Amino acid sequence: TLNTSEMQTSISTGRRLFVVFSKTSCLSTTENLRVSAAQLTDRVRRELAAAGDPSRAPAMQEYMKSDIPYYGVRLPDVRRICRPIFSAHPIDSVGAFDDTVERLFVGATHREERYAAVELAKHPLYRTHQTPDRIPLYRRLIIAGGWWDTVDDIAGNLIGPILTTYPTEVL
């Protein structure tokens, strides 16, 4: 319980609801943690760039025989960086989810951004989005990516579970 004689802040799970009480007033506001696809993409890019190791990047690009440069961030670190960003900024709708995943993947300037897009698609907040309706999105990502590192992850961790969960809808 909140003690109304002191100023306090209460934070609920999900959306952060700040309730501030004082002796004379009660003010309640919801902090808008939702961001646009462009804002989320920019945030991920900034965080990955900041974590990059330029001395590692050329070897990573060479290993993958990739035309797209790397920041020099290992995949476990991409996951560690992105998870809290995705959790803190939930996407409002399925359409916005599709737009954000596609924008991050197709518009990638560095390969780690593609990995981040796949991690966003796999994020627990969006399990309910994993329906046959996502297959066209994941097909576009596979075509745009066209390389085993992203194709294997998309096929095995996104499309495969959809096919298993909805066999009659997709066959």
Image: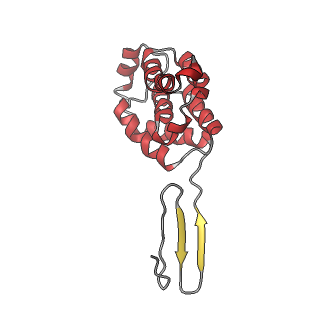
Identify the image's colour scheme: rainbow, by chain, secondary structure or one colour.
Answer: secondary structure
Q: Position of residue 89 (x, y in %)?
A: 53, 48
Count of labels in the image: 0
Residue 66's place in the image compared with 161, above or below, is above
Q: Nearer the viewer, residue 62 or 162?
A: 162
Q: Quadrant of the N terminus?
A: bottom left
72 vs 167, left or right, is: left
- Give the residue furthest to the right: 95
- Please name the residue shown 43% across and 21% down the image: 156
- Please name the residue shown 53% across and 38% down the image: 128
Q: Quadrant of the C terminus?
A: top right
Residue 6's place in the image compared with 63, above or below, is below
Q: Position of residue 93 (x, y in %)?
A: 63, 42
Residue 78's place in the image compared with 145, above or below, is below
Q: Quadrant of residue 27?
A: bottom right
Q: Quadrant of residue 115?
A: top left
Q: Nearer the viewer, residue 153 or 82?
A: 153
24 vs 154, left or right, is: right
Residue 141 appears in the rendering? no
Q: Position of residue 8 (x, y in %)?
A: 47, 75
Residue 153 appears in the rendering? yes
